[in-house]
C-alpha cells in the first residue's frame, strides 16, 4: 500500500493511505504520522476480516 505524506503550513504532517477510505493521521512529526497511519491501516484491515 502506498502512503502519501504532506506537510501542512503549520508544520504538522498528514499521512494517508488512499486505498483505505478514512485512513489518515495528522501529527507533529513525519515519523509519528507514518507510524500512526500504518497502525490505523492494520486496524481497518483487521475489522474487515
Image (tube, grey):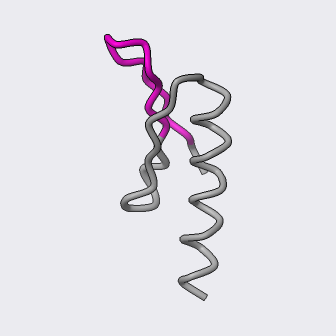
Give the residue displayed 61% in from the left and 51% down from the top: 1
Image quarter hosting the C terminus: bottom right
> Could you tell me residue 43's position as x and y percent?
61, 70
The residue stretch that appears in magenta? 3-15
Where residue 5 appears, x then y in whole percent?
Answer: 49, 29
Q: Is 28 positioned to the left or the right of 10 in the image?
A: right
The picture places residue 31, in percent across and down from the top left corner, at: 67, 28
Q: How many marks?
A: 0
Foreground pick, 7 / 2: 7
Left-right relation of 29 to 22: right
Could you tell me which residue is drawn at 31 percent across and 11 percent down? 9
Answer with left or right where residue 6 lies relative to residue 47.
Answer: left
Is residue 34 shown in magenta? Answer: no
Identify the residue at image location x=35%, y=18%: 8
The answer to whether 39 is drawn above or below residue 36 in the figure is: below
Q: Residue furthest left?
A: 9
| Between 5 and 25, the one nearer to me in the picture | 25
Q: Give the quadrant of residue 26.
A: top left
Residue 48 image position (x, y, % from top left): 54, 83
* 40 vs 36: above or below: below
Residue 29, compared with residue 24, is above or below; it is above
Please report the residue visible at 45 percent of the width from the left and 61 percent of the height from the top. 20
Amino acid at each position: 500500500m502506498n502512503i502519501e505524506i504532506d506537510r501542512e503550513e503549520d508544520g504538522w504532517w498528514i499521512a494517508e493511505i488512499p486505498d483505505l477510505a478514512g485512513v489518515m493521521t495528522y501529527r507533529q512529526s513525519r515519523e509519528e504520522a507514518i507510524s500512526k497511519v500504518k497502525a490505523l491501516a492494520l486496524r481497518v484491515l483487521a475489522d474487515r476480516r
